[in-house]
Image (cartoon, rainbow, N blue to C red):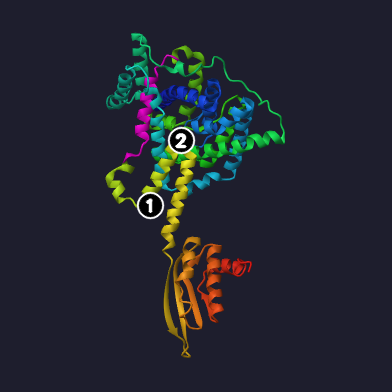
Amino acid sequence: MRRPAVLRREVVAGLVVALALIPEAISFSIIAGVDPRVGLFASFTMAVSIAFLGGRPAMISAATGAVALVIAPVMRDHGLEYLLATVVLGGLIQVALGLAGVARMMRFIPRSVMVGFVNALAILIFLAQLPYLVDVPFLVYPMVAVGILVMVWLPRITTAVPGPLVAIVVLTGAALLAGWELPDVGDEGDLPDTLPFLLLPDVPLTLETLQIIAPYALAMALVGLLESLLTAKLVDDITDTHSDKTREAWGQGGANIITGFFGGMGGCAMIGQTMINVKVSGARTRISTFSAGVLLLVLVVGFGDVVARIPMAALVAVMIMVAVGTFDWHSVAPATLRRMPRSETTVMVSTVVVVVATHNLAIGVAVGVLVAMTLFARRVAHLATTHRELVEDADGEVHARYTVTGELFFASSNDLYTQFEYAEDPERVVIDLSASHVWDASTVASLDAIVTKYERKGKSVEIRGLDEHSTHMHDRLTGQLSGH
């Protein structure tokens, strides 16, 4: 009994995602400056390919706005064939980065950046619905409200059928039966009436072509991998399961290569549709991802006339609920903000602000990581301290002993130079580093500067207590960091 129930759940989840993908793929096609068919075909090939190649079951990959923004200049300046070549090259770069282990870099993204990424995405999903609520017939608003109520109340009655699917069916049926003239999916663009077919991008295989497409392909590869790996990590947290991030990285590349050869505009993981699939519909397997791609093609090619009549109000209601469900409300609760270190909140807010301002998740995450690194460096810079004492030797001679405690790297070692009494110290100085660790060349340069300043005053310096790693770094670099 379990297997049919699981299959039904996964296929129904895929159907809901397919319906939500249609207007998104069309709107992303418009952003990229291509025909809606290019975006829809990309969503089909990406979803079906990643269902087999990807490392995160139940995650949805399709045409996305981030990738559309990156490759739009290629379409504008050079045309569709160069865009398809860019997608293929971007996929090849992703495969190379995946095999090189770029997924392991995910551990350097702090939790506060992840929270900012999720919250910003929820805001972007919500803001993307606003154009469908401006200058529209008044009837749109009660329809959106009814759709939201259906999705809020239905799970309290039954979870056999996903709320979004019921909302779409109910609102579409009501609009068709009543004959209401409302904005619908068909208004977004023409749906394809043929299947995608294999093709080779018609571009000259020259160095000039590579120079044109390579910068955009690299940007597309990085943006796509970042969004996909962050989304995979988010799904891991929601489902309490692990995924193969390395496989996901090269799988995204393989899916983009296939997409480029089938005339698609490329893409990556879609967090909005993934949340519909995993969080709202309860999908957990690759079947849902495969079903989403196949049913998308069936809907737009086989039932295009029916799909075109779905009111945008129904899909707007679905995406608003996705935005509400995606946002981490606990992160902005007053009690949480009072307990959270100010630096963590700063990182989260900066990530949200940059993502919402640029509409680019990759830029926002990069800024968030840089802010986190800067604040961390400032915080630990003050953890390195020195303690000075005057010690009398067995022969009655007095020397100054400095005990340095803490981690020494570029931020903390720059302050180290100022913590010595160069003029007042006796002729012999001992610097004890047994309670610290030398991490970088900046620290070695600071120690060299301290020794040099004492020597100019005719005083000798002994550095002792270095551990094995610190000794190796100090011996290798001391005296080699200045040209003077």
User: Is residue 319 covered in magenta?
Assistant: yes
Asked if residue 281 is positioned above or below residue 373 in the image, the reply reads above
Question: Is residue 255 visible to the viewer in this orientation of the structure?
Answer: no
Q: Which residues are magenta?
A: 308-329
Q: For residue 480, what is the image quadrant?
A: bottom right
Q: Label 1 neighbourhood size at 10 Å, few (<14), some (14-19), many (20+)? A: some
Q: Amino acid at mark 1?
A: Ser
Q: For residue 165, what is the image quadrant?
A: top left
Asked if residue 136 is positioned above or below residue 260 in the image, the reply reads above
The location of residue 252, given as percent across then percent down, is 55, 35
Out of 7 and 457, give the one closest to the viewer: 457
The location of residue 218, given as percent across then percent down, is 59, 39
Quarter of the image for the C terminus: give it.
Answer: bottom right
* Residue at 50% across, 61% down: 410
Q: Amino acid at mark 2?
A: His
Q: Residue under circle 2?
A: 359
Q: Label 2 neighbourhood size at 10 Å, few (<14), some (14-19), many (20+)? A: some
Which of the numbered marks, if any, corresponds to residue 343? 1
The location of residue 413, given as percent across then percent down, is 49, 65
Asked if residue 382 is positioned above or below residue 348 in the image, the reply reads below
Disc 2 is placed on an element classified as loop
The answer to whether marks 2 and 1 mark residues whose Cβ atoms lie closer than 8 Å is no
The location of residue 283, given as percent across then percent down, is 41, 30
Report, in whole angstroms, how far the alpha carbon at label 2 lies from the one at label 1: 24 Å
